[in-house]
Image (cartoon, rainbow, N blue to C red):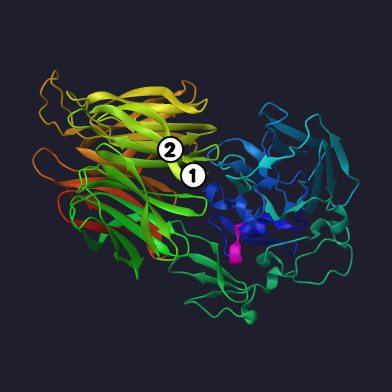
Amino acid sequence: TDLRPLDILSEVVPAGRLAHGMRVFQVQGVRGFQLATSRPHALGFPASRLFIHCDRFPEEFSIIVTLKVLNVPAKRNEYVFTLMAEESPSVLVGLRYAPDKLHFLFWSQEHAGGWQTCVTFPNVSLSDNQWHTLVLAVSGQSFSLTVDCSVPKDVVVETPFPASLSVKTASFYLGNRRRRKGVFTGLLRQLVLLPGADATPQICTAMNFKVATLSVPTVLQDVPMKISSNEVLKYPYETDTKVTLGSRPPCTKQEKAQFWFNASQRGLYLCNGSAWISMLEVKQRLDYVEEYQNLVTNSETMGVEVFTIPKVGLFAATANRYTPPGSAIYKWTDGKFVSYQNIPTYQAQSWKYFTIGKKIFLAVANFEQNDRGQEFSVIYKWSHRKEKFVTYQRITTHSARDWEAFVIEGEAFLAVVNHREGNNHNIDSVIYRWNPRTGLFEINQTIPTSGAYDWEFFTIGPYSFLAVANTFNGTSTKIYSHIYIWLSGSFQLFQSILTFGAADWEVFRIGDRVFLAVANSHSYGSGMPVPSNFYAINSSIYELNITAQMFVKFQDLLTYSALDWEFFSVGDDSFLVVANSFDGFTFSVNSIIYRWQGYEGFVAAHHLPTVGCRDWEAFHTAEGSYLLYSSAKEPLSKVLKLKTT
């Protein structure tokens, strides 16, 4: 067992850079972090950054915390930290404080039937406006809490801490449980996990037990006066603090622990001896959208995929209509997308980037046959040696429209949407499972679909879902699209929703709410009344109703042959952009960015001129945030930059 201290707090401030929503305060001569409530996700990181050699949480360990608690209301609970599985509301491991109580939470699949166990330490009073250091030692059924090196409080419970708790897809969250409710409102100075040992003997050697240190982030380490007696530090340091105004001043050892206020950007920065660290971040707001780059493509573009290859760069893959020249991959270079690689494709519809372990893949959905009359869609693998994508596996498909990659219970899957076979639109789409022994995808399940366009995978708590957008059954576009749930090793029907030429599903979350938006492309049916406009129809947003255990309609938005939705955020604001492609008369139609307005729902905020808009992708670089749209009617896609205030 690796017995080195695992500094959870330092992982949230790599290289001294504070995460969004963190501020440094100094009280009683001791520095600590204050955490904001607006974006709890920003205060998290993957557990794999701590557990490098093993994806299991240690069976025996100590947790060391130095904190300063504010007065907590009688019925309020605040989380010091949590460890949570990806997209699951369950807390695998957590520490929670309530007035005069401390709760240690853990999830034991083996012993408690998958329920959470709560170990409570009563009569733990920390709300005295002082710093305190806690050491929680865990071993099997025994739990011991030491506060400021006093007499330990011991608790023995029936359910032991699990011997093999997987953290493979889990993340640590600082001061929260991935929600705004229950965020820690005090100051946090130290949060360390020590595997395999009771840390009390290591901690209880300092003269000042209340701020005893095992590992503290660099930005918090400077104690401004020497401790000469066994007492809490007083207030000599704040009077020496200097704040500089104006342009960026130098940050050297001489300016260490000094502040700089940038009046133009309303930002407050702290010098750590070499660089200015943001203490007070101004939340960005979307002001307007400007044209940034005209991306000339090989031919009309049916879809685009933006992705990042670690240590290589940011890329965009365009699914182009004609062969030759096929489809292209572009690399972000000097602030623009430049041509990087061409790949032969056959009326390509979309790309999907995904990884399995260290392997990097890119799958294309081909709509037409190749030169030999064969109908394949192809999976390409990134070659680190060639720094190119090379052919890896060919899969027989039928007018493929889309790929979706996902992981369930540690297993990798790839689902293809088959649109039609000849003139028959009512055919099977296929879900493939990765076989780690052969290194290939193999058929796992087939699902009947009708002229399908899109798969959308998502998880809610421990449950996995797959939604299909059915477009046309041979006679009508007014048909049901379906949501499937993973149960007992396969996808089973969960809910059916009436759609009109559905071309895309987009799942997104705002706070604790889960939404699912469908892009309806056109209304046509042999037995339907002829509408005034086949293409000017409502697309709908559905919200998950937990009580009813189903998605219910939340809002209708008028769209014009909508083919795609893309959700993105700027600061604390949430947006949806729709790809309007055709209004019945022209392909030059405004696509619209809708802004989330709470009770009002989504409200139109920006009207963007587009031509045959087919797909939207949002992405971010160090220079800012962008939208990329593909045109299915001209060999020109556009990069738009989001200008913020």
Q: Which residue is mark 1?
A: 438
Mark 2 belongs to which amino acid?
Glu
Mark 1 belongs to which amino acid?
Thr
State the mark number for residue 28.
none
Q: Is residue 173 above or below residue 107?
A: below
What type of secondary structure mainly makes up the magenta span?
A: helix
Asked if residue 394 lies left or right of residue 186, the reply is left
Judge whether residue 506 can be spotted in this image: no
Q: Residue furthest top?
A: 527
**Quadrant assignment for the C terminus:** bottom left
Q: Is residue 461 above or below residue 173?
A: above
The image position of residue 435, as x and y in percent, is 49, 41
Asked if residue 50 lies left or right of residue 313, the reply is right
Front residue of this view, candidates 57 and 254: 57
The image position of residue 353, as x and y in percent, is 39, 50
Q: Residue at x 70, y 31 (%)?
A: 110
Q: In the image, which residues are magenta?
A: 12-16
Q: Is residue 637 above or below residue 447?
A: below
The image position of residue 620, as x and y in percent, is 40, 58
Q: Are the residues at dot 2 and dot 1 in contact (C-beta closer than 8 Å)?
A: yes
Whole-Å distance between the Cαs marked 2 and 1? 10 Å
- Looking at the rendered structure, the number of numbered marks drawn on it comes to 2
In this view, the mark in front (2 or 1)? 1
- Residue 74 is inside the magenta segment: no
The image position of residue 34, as x and y in percent, is 63, 55
Q: Residue at x 85, y 58 (%)?
A: 202
Q: Residue furthest left?
A: 585
Q: Residue furthest front?
A: 372
Q: Residue furthest right?
A: 151
State the mark number for residue 442.
2
